[in-house]
Amino acid sequence: DAKTTQPNSMESNEEEPVHLPCNHSTISGTDYIHWYRQLPSQGPEYVIHGLTSNVNNRMASLAIAEDRKSSTLILHRATLRDAAVYYCILRDNYGQNFVFGPGTRLSVLP
Amino acid sequence: GAVVSQHPSRVICKSGTSVKIECRSLDFQATTMFWYRQFPKQSLMLMATSNEGSKATYEQGVEKDKFLINHASLTLSTLTVTSAHPEDSSFYICSARRTGEVQPQHFGDGTRLSIL
């Protein structure tokens, strides 16, 4: 599975939008882009995934660059409960498991 | 839907004890389940892939005789840490993939294992 690069940490103010970047310059044509987040002392929680087009769901939006070498997870209005480590992971349909990098630790300030 | 349940959520036991952790897919069938380990302030590391009805596949460096995995049904996989020692203290997390579905993967809430 191709590698991703994310900032170690980011800060946001409550009720403001948050843009979490992810670089994946070696992505292959069949790799899906997944985002998971992990709250303290919990297992990872699915956020969103996509292949080529931008995706929206009730939790977040995923903006995928046209060349697919980067993507951005967008939380439209950060809440204190969004403070977590966010993981950007690539996997194709033949891949077995997810390979977790260090992720981005998001802090949300009241 | 797609809920994965782990039990127990926390266990504290003496060195030398064997500990069994259960991972259940509550509302779907999972041919494949995964076991991860996470040390404090580190990311998740895959330990093994558990396939229903067959032997688990272990990652390099993970002792299969130490970490016994059984996936006897489409909704249950168990991880047994045999003769646990303090260095086995960690956060163990399982995940499951719905049979026939590749994306996404569903995770349990983890088991915090503390060996005294």
Image (cartoon, coloured by chain):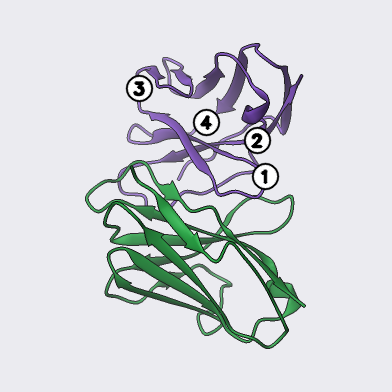
Chain colours: A purple, B green
Give the residue displayed 30% in from the left and 45% down from the top: B102
Q: CA distance from mark 1 to mark 3?
A: 31 Å
Q: CA distance from mark 1 to mark 4?
A: 26 Å
- Mark found first going from the N terminus, 4 or 2: 4
Q: Secondary structure at mark 4?
A: loop
- Mark found first going from the N terminus, 1 or 3: 1
Q: CA distance from mark 3 to mark 4?
A: 13 Å
Q: Is residue B64 left or right of residue A42?
A: left
Q: CA distance from mark 4 to mark 2?
A: 21 Å
Q: Chain of mark 3?
A: A
Q: CA distance from mark 1 to mark 2?
A: 7 Å
Please tell me if label 4 and label 2 are on a single chain. yes
Residue in the foreground of this view, choosing between A37 and A64? A37
Q: Nearer the viewer, mark 4 or mark 2?
A: 2
Q: Which residue position is annotated with label 1?
A: A40
Q: Which residue position is annotated with label 3?
A: A52
Q: Nearer the viewer, mark 1 or mark 3?
A: 1
Judge whether B76 appears above or below A94 on screen: below
Q: CA distance from mark 3 to mark 2?
A: 26 Å
Please tell me if label 1 and label 2 are on a single chain. yes
Q: Tell me whether circle 1 and circle 4 mark residues in contact (CB < 8 Å).
A: no
Give the residue displayed 56% in from the left and 19% down from the top: A75
Position of the N terminus of chain A by quadrant? top left
Kind of residue sitting beneath label 3: Thr
- Mark found first going from the N terminus, 1 or 2: 1
Q: Chain of mark 4?
A: A
Q: Is residue B40 left or right of residue A71?
A: right
Residue B107 image position (x, y, % from top left): 46, 50
Residue B96 image position (x, y, % from top left): 38, 55
Labelled disc at residue A84 = 2
Q: Tell me whether circle 1 and circle 2 mark residues in contact (CB < 8 Å).
A: yes
Residue A36 image position (x, y, % from top left): 51, 37
